[in-house]
Image: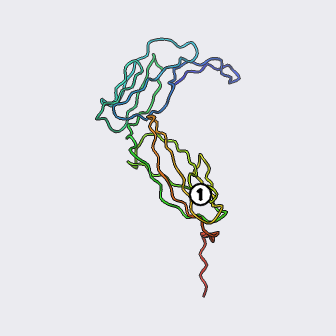
Amino acid sequence: GRYMFTVDLNGNIVSAKGIALNKNSLKLLAGGSETLTVSYVGNTSGTVTWSSNNEKITVSNGKVEVASDATGTAKITATCGSYTATCDVTVVKKITSISAAAILVGQGQTKQIVVTTNPAENVEDITYSYEVTANTSNASVDSTTGIVTGTTIGNATVTITGTTASGETKTTTCAITVTEKQAQILDDVYTGI
């Protein structure tokens, strides 16, 4: 938001006035909605008016509503007197599935699982959890980062569970092959004569 500050002769803030929104940005699915709330800073008071710069993403009394055929972005503006606060809204797509390519990791080494969403771009937020679900003695995985450590030569399976911002659960598996320790590939290439 935009604030007005009163400072004393030493530069210390004595009081502040203005408004703020509970969120500066939102990701919403087409057809979705969420309500923004205004906080008054200092002794600011008055009626808040709302506006949107996209006719397919409307706002009334703080409730942002996205039309079912909306795409793109909008800037929602709350105004109270000379004070304003804004929230950037992005229309995102619902994730229909997730997948992960098989990985090869050396014994005692680590590798990151890369999860791909379908669709691949401009999608709702998703949080992943990872668990070794087959041949657990051959590999371990960090449950939040998806970094696999090869422990014993052989195969393992990691199950990945994704929870979307809209509350849906998506799962997939990642085949892990643990081999002998791999040589490290360096950025510098040595060429002999």
Task: Check the picture and name the quadrant holding the C terminus.
Answer: bottom right
Q: Residue at x 68, y 24 (%)?
A: 11
Q: Residue furthest left?
A: 69
Percent across and percent down for residue 113 are 54, 55
Element assignment for label 1:
loop
Few, some or many residues within 10 Å of mark 1 (<14, 14–19, 20+): some
Q: Residue at x 59, y 75 (%)?
A: 189
Is residue 72 placed above or below 191 in the rendered structure?
above
Percent across and percent down for residue 120 are 40, 49
Residue placed most toward the observer, 99 or 80: 99
Percent across and percent down for residue 142 are 62, 50
Q: Residue at x 63, y 54 (%)?
A: 140
Q: Residue furthest right?
A: 10
Percent across and percent down for residue 130 are 56, 48
- The number of discs equals 1
The amino acid marked with disc number 1 is: Asn
In this rendering, would 11 be left or right of 81?
right
What residue is shown with label 1?
Answer: 135
Q: Residue at x 53, y 17 (%)?
A: 40
Residue placed most toward the observer, 146 or 156: 156
In this rendering, would 95 be left or right of 42?
left
Is residue 40 placed above or below 68 in the rendered structure?
above
Residue placed most toward the observer, 182 or 150: 150
In this rendering, would 141 be left or right of 69?
right
Residue 67, located in which quarter of the rendered image?
top left
Q: Residue furthest front?
A: 135
